[in-house]
Image (tube, rainbow, N blue to C red):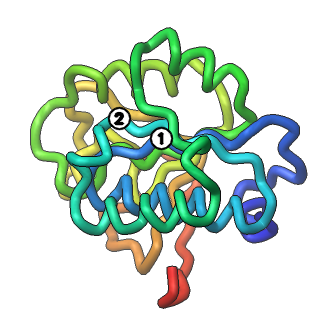
Amino acid sequence: HTRFRNVTGVQTCALPISILCGKGNNGGDGFVVARLLHKQRAKVQVLTLAPVADLSRDAATMCRRLVRSAGKTVLKPFSSAIQLQTLLGNSDIVVDALLGTGLASPVTGRYADAIECINLARRMTVAVDLPSGIHADSGAVLGRAVKADLTVTFGLPDRKSTRLNSSHVSESRMPSSA
């Protein structure tokens, strides 16, 4: 939580931090963020856009670790844009861990709805690796993209990541036990 405050510049969070997780490795990173913030006593709520059974192997592993640490109640399956608007409206910070470097086609469906809700919420938004909806190689917007205030990578960013539409790109090294 202290490191998160240092990166975001936010000193306290009266409301929960909402982490939106997709089904791939980016979502897995979101589950790690949620678990680490929970361990630091931050209030977290995790919205999953895919059923747990559809998560990638790594994302499912990180989801199980989160549930063991924080309990099942932190997980909230996506049901509608209205549910997401309410959740985000009751949040101080939003973490975008929906779509990552594997995105190759325009964003549609519930992922497009989620991106729209994130952008309309006007909350401090932190993207994991790159804002969802941005093509990792070209920087092109594929349909819709999250307008992140900050992008955090869990490794070293490549040259392309510095061109993203976030106001700041940060890097950090994750401990091997993450």
Cα–Cα span, label 1 and label 2:
7 Å
Left or right of 66 on screen, residue 42: right
Q: Is residue 150 visible?
A: yes
Q: What element carries label 2?
A: loop
Q: In the image, residue 115 lies at what x, y percent?
A: 40, 27
Q: Residue at x 29, y 38 (%)?
A: 50
Q: In this view, does 130 lie above or below 85?
A: below
Q: In the image, residue 141 lies at what x, y percent?
A: 26, 35
The dot on residue 79 is none
Picture quarter containing residue 81? top left
Residue sitting farthest toward the left: 105
Residue sitting farthest toward the top: 82
Q: Which residue is drawn at 67% across and 30% down?
A: 123
Q: Is mark 1 on a helix, strand or loop?
A: strand
Q: Which residue is drawn at 80% across and 60% down?
A: 41
Q: In the image, residue 63 lies at what x, y percent?
A: 43, 58
In-front residue for pair 140/156: 156
Left or right of 133 on screen, residue 17: right
Q: Is residue 125 visible?
A: no
Q: Is residue 47 above or below residue 40?
A: above
Q: Which residue is drawn at 88% across and 53% down?
A: 11
How would you rate the neighbour count of disc 2 (Cα within 10 Å): few for under 14, some for 14-19, many for 20 or more?
many
Q: Name the residue under label 1.
A: 20
Left or right of 135 on screen, residue 145: right
How would you rate the neighbour count of disc 1 (Cα within 10 Å): few for under 14, some for 14-19, many for 20 or more?
many
Under mark 2, the amino acid is Leu
Residue sitting farthest toward the bottom: 176
Picture quarter containing residue 68? bottom right
In the rendered structure, are the residues bearing label 1 and label 2 in contact, judged by CB atoms less than 8 Å apart?
A: yes
Task: Say whether disc 1 or disc 2 marks the residue closer to the N-terminus.
Answer: 1
Under mark 1, the amino acid is Leu
Q: Name the residue under label 2.
A: 49
